[in-house]
Amino acid sequence: MQKAAWSLALSSAFAVVTAGALVTPAFADPDLAGSWKGAGTVTYSSGAKEQARCRARFSPSGARAYDVSATCATQSGTVSQTAFVRGRGSNYRGTFYNPEFDTSGKIQISVSGHSQVVRLTSDKGSAIIRLSR
């Protein structure tokens, strides 16, 4: 698989992250700030799949908004990407960008108790990654 296609799919996969968070009441926004790590699956537009290991850092950038930087590795290689997400309660949405391959797409994060599921999608593929602190 070409590295560019892999990168785009992995960037999409980066959006799918399960992250551990402190338990908060249903009415409170979870605090995503800090470092997370975990794994998931990247699915390329060709249908091929690879396992990915990722590290992400969430930095507050406004009310219920975060800048995200992440690095993910699969058998094909390692890529880095950035994202911006905004949300309320346990749901966050935004966009991601991989400068190395000039690829962008959508990111969606769902937080539940001590975990977070991040879903990435682009024209090159998708990913679901689960992270914890």
Image: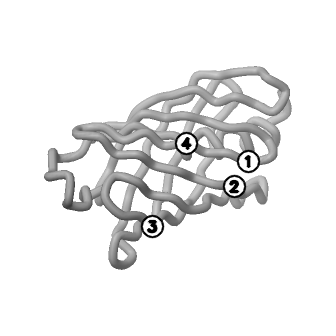
Q: Quadrant of residue 64?
A: bottom left
Give the SS element for disc 1.
Answer: strand
| Cα–Cα span, label 3 and label 2 | 15 Å
Q: Residue at x 73, y 48 (%)?
A: 122
Residue shown at 29% from the left, 40% from the top: 112
Q: First in sequence: mark 3 or mark 2?
A: 3
In terms of secondary structure, where does tag 2 sit?
A: strand
Sequence order check, earlier mark of 1 and 2: 2
- Identified by mark 1, the residue type is Ser
- The residue wearing badge 4 is 119
Q: Amino acid at mark 3?
A: Arg
Along the viewing direction, whichever of 58 and 23 lies nearer the viewer: 23
Q: Which residue is mark 2?
A: 105
Mark 4: which amino acid?
A: Arg
- Quadrant in which the C terminus appears: top left
Q: CA distance from mark 4 to mark 1?
A: 10 Å
Badge 4 or badge 3: first in the primary sequence: 3
Circle 3 is placed at which residue position?
86
Cα separation between marks 1 and 3:
19 Å
The quadrant the N terminus occupies is top right
Rounded to the nearest angstrom, the CA distance separating label 2 from label 4 is 10 Å
What residue is pinned by disc 1? Answer: 122
Q: Is residue 115 above or below residue 86?
A: above
- Can you tell which mark lies on residue 28? none
